[in-house]
Amino acid sequence: MMEAIIAGLGGLVIGFKLLFVNWQSLIMLGVGGVLLYLGIKKDCEPLLLVPIGFGCILVNIPMSDVMLKDGFIRVIYDAGVDTELFPLLIFIGIGAMTDFGPVLAQPYTFLLGAAGQFGIFLTLLLALYLGFPKLDAVSIGVIGACDGPTAIYVTSKYAPHLLGAVAVAAYSYMALVPVIQPPIMRALTSEKERKTAMKFTAKPVSKTTKLLFPLVITIVGGCIAPKGLPLLATIMLGNLMKESGCVARLTGAAENEIANVVTLFLGLSIGATMAGPAFIRQETLIVLGLGFLAICLDTVCGVIFAKGLYIITGGKVNPLIGAAGISAFPMAARVVAKEGNKFNKKSYLLMHAMGANAGGQIGSVIAAAVMLSVLAGMGVIR
Amino acid sequence: MEMSNFTFGVTMLVAGMGGTLVTLGILSLMMAGLGKLFPYKEDEGKED
């Protein structure tokens, strides 16, 4: 009988024993803790990093069955990540939350949103050079979209084994935009350029234009890049609901209840892809490094493009606004406005930067859509 | 025949980035056109 009791009690400590055998899981428990710390104490994208960190801890507990067949996170993962449903549902919420008025008031800022996507393609080239397979390189490059749902959508479809690293990189670096961008902006511009004051003379946008905007983007963008139609359509559906003003309940649900529930499920599912043996690899560190580089390159190319506009317009465009042409909305615009204000107290860059930032939001989705359609055109994907 | 990584990368850069720039350029022109076709009227603000 004593033996049976000892064997029974032994079952209670086997998890601890395995913890020290599986050193990768032990490290990942620490990584989960760091993600929780960043979310809770440092306020870095807490809505995502808290569930991701917790999911990471759950999957790394020895003998955890949350990601095995019929495990509770596996069920959520299969239903929403594997099917690419969650990023799309989040996009409806983002569309419902975003005011595209500033970019509609100054349509030229769409181009700044395009320049901010160069990092995607340059990083893709670098990933290929480092020996990553084609679709892995595409998924790594898309971190440069600075857009979590877009990165998750593309990666879950074409490189699901990189999902944890890509998602963590996308959301962590987005939160670090106020740290990453200012040194690059200062390094690439002269003091004279940074002091450029810009007037905001754009007229308000009519209701009809705001209503037609999501329809035009969906139809024209969908015709050019049909493979990315789900991305375009969902963000524009959310925006159409917001601008129509006649479905306040649906708009409210999209930007609150639906977005919140899906964010929780998405975060948990992504965290649960970070199992130690699969995550602790040289490849993961390279992905994180390339993701960082992608966001730096976006900023570099955006500022250089805006410097071109500065020259063309005879010094009327402040090159700093080029850094706002990424998807981290409205954080990048605020960073630009703050940076501009440091050098010229009379410089009111916020509305121009908001235009570029809203352009970057559309630009990142268009870039991903175009990329998928080019891949389909080349026969790399179906 | 399997496409080389170099060809793939350059194609993605040219067609992908070029496609993005052209698409956003077209959309920018269309939005500017819509703004001219349907200008803001002062009474819209009152309706809101």
Image (tube, coloured by chain):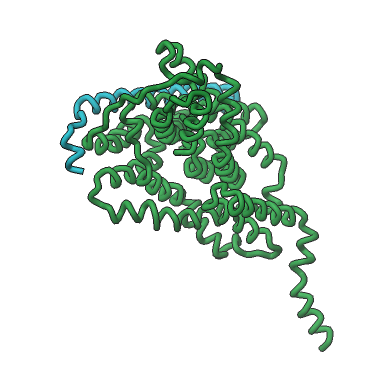
Q: Is residue A360 visible?
A: yes
Chain letter for the green colouring in the rendering: A
The quarter of the picture where residue B39 lies is top left
Residue A183 in the image: state x and y as whole percent: 60, 28
Total number of numbered discs in the rendering: 0
**Farthest-out residue, bottom:** A1
Q: Is residue B16 visible?
A: no
Looking at the picture, tell me which residue is in the foreground, A196 or A314.
Answer: A196
Residue A192 in the image: state x and y as whole percent: 52, 15
Looking at the picture, tell me which residue is in the foreground, B17 or A235.
Answer: A235
Residue A85 in the image: state x and y as whole percent: 43, 51
Horizontally, residue A303 falls left or right of residue A201, namely right
Residue at image coords 54%, 48%: A45
Residue B18 in the image: state x and y as whole percent: 45, 22
Q: Quadrant of the N terminus of chain A?
A: bottom right
Looking at the picture, tell me which residue is in the foreground, A123 or A307.
Answer: A307
Horizontally, residue A114 falls left or right of residue A65, namely left
Q: Is residue A235 above or below residue A35?
A: above
Residue at image coords 35%, 56%: A253
**Farthest-out residue, front:** A345
Q: Colour of chain B?
A: cyan
Q: Is residue A14 above or below residue A120?
A: below
**Farthest-out residue, right:** A2
Residue at image coords 59%, 45%: A168
